[in-house]
Structures are given as structure tokens and as C-alpha cells.
Amino acid sequence: MAKELNEIRIIELFRKHLDSSPHIFMGLKSATGIHEDAGVIRLSDGKLLVVTTDLIGRKTHVPPKMTLFQMGQKAVTVNVSDLAAMGAEPLGLVFSVGFPKDITTKDVEDIAKGMNVAAKQYGTCVFGGDTNQTDDIILAGTAIGITNEEQILLRSGAQEDDIVAVTGWIGGAALGLYCLKKGIELDFHLLQYTLEPKARLKEALILNKLKAVTAAGDITDGLAWEIFKIGEASEKGIIIYEDHLPIQEKVIEIAHAYNLDPLELALYIGEDFELVLTISPDKWELVKKKCAEMNIKITAIGKVISDRKILMEMKSGQIISLRKEGYDQFKTKF
């Protein structure tokens, strides 16, 4: 691959040569669509069909010790996560699957069972697809969801003084990925973030009903990268605070033991299937109350600012600029 090509450049090339149609509510050619991970088709009565696609391959996306059952689960999860980030309820998924000649019946059944278990967790199903022969196990999924024009969550709605919040914990999945690739033993409950990630669909749909979220995205490509996307789409800046980031003490301890920076793991590596949200300040107490009732972990980590910079205030009080950097499969970190 040419050195100048990366994921963003490839998308730009497709955007240059593809056309759109009037029934496309949002897509690659629309001003907001370039910032989103799904396309949206306009239906009748204000309803919107959200369509997203994601692909994983065993050689490029599957860490050591991930079983084929878990690979099947993850193939569903990565697609549903994009629906969650847009506040869409899943209708179903289809998959194009590629298998090498030496694939066994058990291998195929393990993948199918993993897909089915994950789909059921999200209240949906895999209802069709295609198969072909390939040199690797390739699972290319398309998830279809439904929402409406009033409820769709986009990255472009953040307003000045909105609270920036994240669900769950961050950094653990990146640590697990590093340890798996280096053959380092790690407690299974930490490895689960990497081997069995969960899309935050329930959280997205619950919070969306409160009409409190102004912008949203998932942080599978790293928190910093996602914050940059929201900032650019909303034409705003964001400042986050180091001492507010929900990184587990165990993750910090293990990272330091292997000369890793926990902030680098949380900000730039990715694999966390959490949501980053901007929330109206007057709705924050309502959001916290609802999350407490539903046992949802949510943490305020910063705020939206008018100055179009992406910043972090360190524990020392120093304010630094975050790097516009995240997971890029053409430039893997480790």
C-alpha cells in the first residue's frame, strides 16, 4: 500500500468518486455524513433507516487467545456499536463471510454461535448474507437500525458548555490487547474488555429518551480521536481533565509495570466500546439520576468550549493539546 494512504485518505478518495441520491438523509457526500460511521436513508413519517458496515479479519483484527466464538460475537458487536452511537434500535444484521479452504465444520459453527449469542444480547438477529472462499477468515457485517429525525444522535450537535461524558471504563481494552500480543498474563476480567467487548446499546437508547444528549460517538478508535470527530463536526472545541478520566487503578498499575502510559492507552489506542457523549448542562443531574437507577456507569470528563481546540488539563494544572490520533488499521501501534 502506498505510504500516503491511510483510512481517512481512502474514505476521501471514495467520497470524491461516489454520487448520492435524494432519499439519502445522510451519507458520504453530505456535510454531516462525512463525520459519521453510518449512512442514513429517509423513510416515511420522519423515520430513518440507519445502515452501517464493519469488517474483521482473523489475521488483522483478532488478538491471540480470542476464540472463533468470540470473533463471531465481536463481528456483531462492532456493527451494533455504530447503531448505538446514533441512537438507532437494531432491526437485524447480514454478513458476507469469507473462509479459507481448511475451515472446519466446528470452526463455522463456533463463529455462527458467537454471532447468534451477541445478536440476541442486543435484541436482534443475523438474518442473511453471503459466503465465499478467502485466504483468511473474514466477517463483513452490515447492521440495520431504525430511528427518527428527532432522535438520531450525530457528532455535529455539541454546544458550548455541554458536559462531555463517557460510559464505563476506558484504557482496559488497549492494555488487554498489548498483553495478549506480548504474551503477558492478565486477569480474565480485564481481558474481557478485549476479548468480549460489549456495545453500549442499552445505555444509548435509555439516554436518548431523556433528550439530553447533543452529540455522541463510540470510542473504538480511541477517546482522543472521537473527541476530535465531535469537535470538528460540531465546529467547537473540547477540554477534558486528566483526573476525571475513568481508568481503573489496576489498569494504571499494570501499565506502569510494563512501561506503558495509561493515558496513551485510553486516548490513542482504541478498542473501548464505550460511548462519549455531550450532554446539556441543565440535563446532567437527570442523566446522572437515570444512570444510577439503571446501574449505568457514566463519568463527566470535560466540557465543550468555543475555541476550536482539543485540550486536556493535566493533574498538574498544565493544559496540553491532544494529538489528532487514534486507531488506524494501516498504522497499528503494537
Image (tube, rainbow, N blue to C red):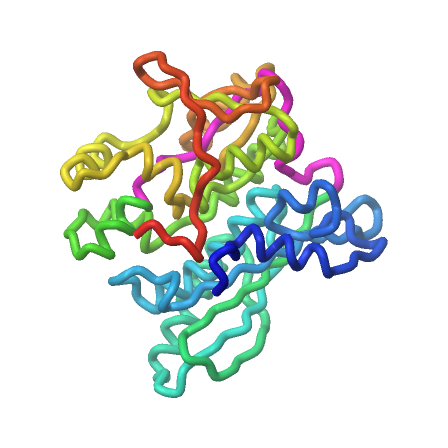
Direction from residue 77 to residue 39 in the image, left or right:
right
Residue 27 percent across, percent down from the top left: 71, 51
Could you tell me which residue is drawn at 53 percent across and 31 percent down?
277
| Residue 297 place in picture, x, y as percent | 40, 31
Residue 114 appears left or right of 78? left
What is the magenta segment's predominant secondary structure?
A: loop
Tell me if 46 is positioned left or right of 248 in this view: right
Q: Residue at x 66, y 30 (%)?
A: 157
* Of the pair 13 and 74, the residue shown nearer to us: 13
The image quarter containing residue 330 is bottom left
Instruction: Measuring from the top left, give residue 53's x and y in whole percent.
Output: 58, 59
On the question of residue 300 being in view, the answer is no
Query: Which one is nearer the viewer's eye here, 309 or 303?
Result: 309
Q: Nearer the viewer, residue 176 or 299?
A: 176
- Magenta-colored span: 149-173
x and y percentages locating residue 199 in the rendered image: 46, 48
Magenta span has 65? no
Q: Is residue 37 visible?
A: yes
Residue 159 shown in magenta:
yes
Work out whether 270 lies above or below 10: above
Residue at 75 percent of width and 46 percent of height: 30
